[in-house]
Structure formats: structure tokens, C-alpha cells
Image (spheres, helix red, strand yellow):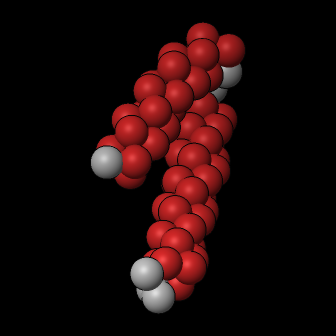
Amino acid sequence: MIGNIVGSLFSKVVDNAEGILDKVITTDKERDEAKLALKTLLLEAEREAFAKEVEDRKSARDMYKDD
């Protein structure tokens, strides 16, 4: 569930940012490079968020395994 929310949020951020990049950057090559860099950055952030969620679940299981 959290993954769906985060994915949806990142998707909206990418769409809005790409719209801004289309207006600000004038050459196609620069625009494509900026969009690729943005997507790479957001995918890395999403990967890190997922890894932290997995880590939190693991630590919660460890904490409550004796209950």
C-alpha cells in the first residue's frame, strides 16, 4: 500500500517537473537529459524509501517476535 502511494506521488512529481522542463529548456537534447536525470533521481529515492520500509518491517518483527 505504501509503495502504491509513493509510486503515485513520484509519478505526479515527474509529470509536473517534465512540464516545467518543457517550458524552461529549449533544446530537445538538454530537455531529454534533464528528464532522464530527474527520473533517475526519483527512482533512486523510491528505491531508498522502499528499502527503509523493508528495514522498518524487519526491525518491528524482531522487536515483537517474542510476543
Residue 39 vs 21, above or below: the answer is below
Residue 53 vs 30, above or below: the answer is below
For the C terminus, give its image quadrant: bottom left
Q: Position of residue 19 (x, y in %)?
A: 51, 17
Residue 20 vs 47, above or below: the answer is above
Q: Is residue 23 visible?
A: yes
- Residue drawn at (57%, 57%) of the image: 49
Q: Nearer the viewer, residue 56 or 15?
A: 56
Q: Nearer the viewer, residue 51 or 35?
A: 51
- Please indicate whether residue 61 sits to the left or right of residue 59 in the image: left
Q: Position of residue 50 (x, y in %)?
A: 50, 62
Q: How many marks?
A: 0
Q: Position of residue 29 (x, y in %)?
A: 59, 37
Q: Nearer the viewer, residue 4 or 29?
A: 4
- Residue drawn at (39%, 39%) of the image: 5
- Please indicate whether residue 3 sits to the left or right of residue 64 in the image: left
Tell which residue pokes out farthest to the bottom in this image. 66
Tell which residue pokes out farthest to the top in this image. 23
Q: Nearer the viewer, residue 25 or 42?
A: 42
Q: Quadrant of residue 63?
A: bottom right
- Residue drawn at (52%, 72%) of the image: 60
Q: Is residue 40 visible?
A: no
Q: Position of residue 8 (x, y in %)?
A: 38, 35
Tell which residue pokes out farthest to the front in this image. 67
